[in-house]
Amino acid sequence: MGAGQVDRTVTAAIVEDLDVVVEGVRSWVAADPGRRVSITAVVDSVDALLAGPGREADVVVLDLDLGRDMVTDRVPELSDLGLRVVVFSVHVKPLVVQAVMDAGACAFLDKRTGKHHFVDTLAAVAGDEPYVTPSMAGGLLQAARLSEREREALVYLFQGMSHESIARRMKKPGGAAISPATVKQYIGRARAKFAAMGRPCASNFALLARCIEDGLIRPDQVEDYRSAGR
C-alpha cells in the first residue's frame, strides 16, 4: 500500500486476550460512518497472528499485556515482517510509549481513547500518513524518535543504496534478509514521523538534513558505499 489516503477498506488484525476489549473494538469499527476499517482476524497471541491470516492485515492492533507476558519485545519482529503495528494498551507511562515507538510501532493508543480517535488512527497508519496520538505527544516527539531499524535503513539509503540492496543487508534475528517492501516502510515511517512534527521532508536530501539536525545520523555515516568498497 502506498503512502497517503487509502482508497479501500483497511483490514485490521486484533491481538488481544480479553473478550470485552475485542467486542468494544468491534463496536467502534462498526459504528464508523465511513466503514473505513474491517476486522479480519482476532487472536490472543503474537504467535497465533503470525500463523494465521492476520499477518496479511494492513494494521495490527497489539495489546502489550497478553496473559502474564508483556510483548514489547515482539514489536521489532512484527515490524521486520512489514507489519504496521498500533499498540493499544493501559500501560501509558512515557517510558513505555517511548520503548514501543523505538521498537518500531507506528502509533500508540491508550485504552481510554475514544472510538473516533481509534478508527482515525488505524486509517492513518494504514495509509502511512503522519499521525500523533495523545499518548505519543507531551514531549516525546519534540525530536523525531526513529526506531533502530528505521535509522539503519536511512543510513544505507543515504549511502546511495537501493531498497533491494538495503534489504539484503538488514537481517532478521534468524539471519534471513528483510524484504524491499519492508525497507520502503521503514523509510516511509521515518518521513511520517518528521511530518507529524510539522517538519516534512519532500526529498531524501531534506530527510538527511532533518536526521543530522536531530543527531540521529552523523555526517560521517553517509559516505557513498561504492567509494567505500562495500
Image: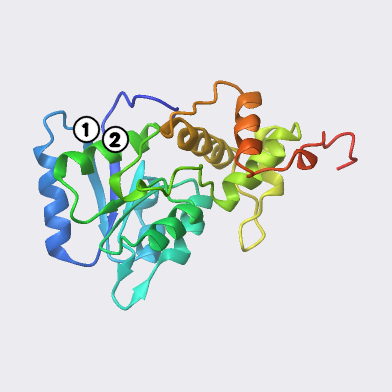
Q: Residues within 10 Å of mark 1 (few under 14, many from 20)?
A: some
Mark 2 secondary-structure assignment: helix
The residue furthest top is: 202
**Residue contact at pointers 2 and 1, CB within 8 angstroms:** yes
Give residue 7's position: percent from left, percent from top: 31, 23
Task: Give the total of numbered labels.
Answer: 2
**Which mark sits nearer the N-terminus, 2 or 1?**
1
Q: Residue furthest bottom?
A: 68
Pointer 2: residues within 10 angstroms few (<14), some, or many (20+)?
many
Left or right? Give the position of 134 relative to 130. Answer: left
Residue highlighted by disc 1: 36
Q: Please indicate, yes or no, whether residue 216 appears anywhere in the rendered image.
A: yes
Q: Which mark is residue 2?
A: none
In this view of the protein, which residue sits in the foreground, 11 or 219? 219
Q: How far is the residue under mark 2 from the one under mark 1?
A: 7 Å
154 left or right of 84? right
Per the image, the residue denoted by label 2 is 123
Q: Residue at x 62, y 63 (%)?
A: 174
The mark lying in front, picked from 2 and 1, is 2
Residue 230 in picture, x, y percent from top left: 86, 43
Residue appearing at x 77%, y 42% in the figure:
221
- Which quadrant is home to the N terminus? top left
* Residue type at numbered disc 2: Ala
Percent of width and height locating residue 92:
31, 60
Quadrant in the rendering for residue 218: top right
What residue do we see at 76% from left, 38% from top?
219
Instruction: Using the rendered view, name the quadrant where residue 89 is placed.
Output: bottom left
Give the residue type that dot 1 points to: Arg
Residue 195 in picture, x, y percent from top left? 45, 30
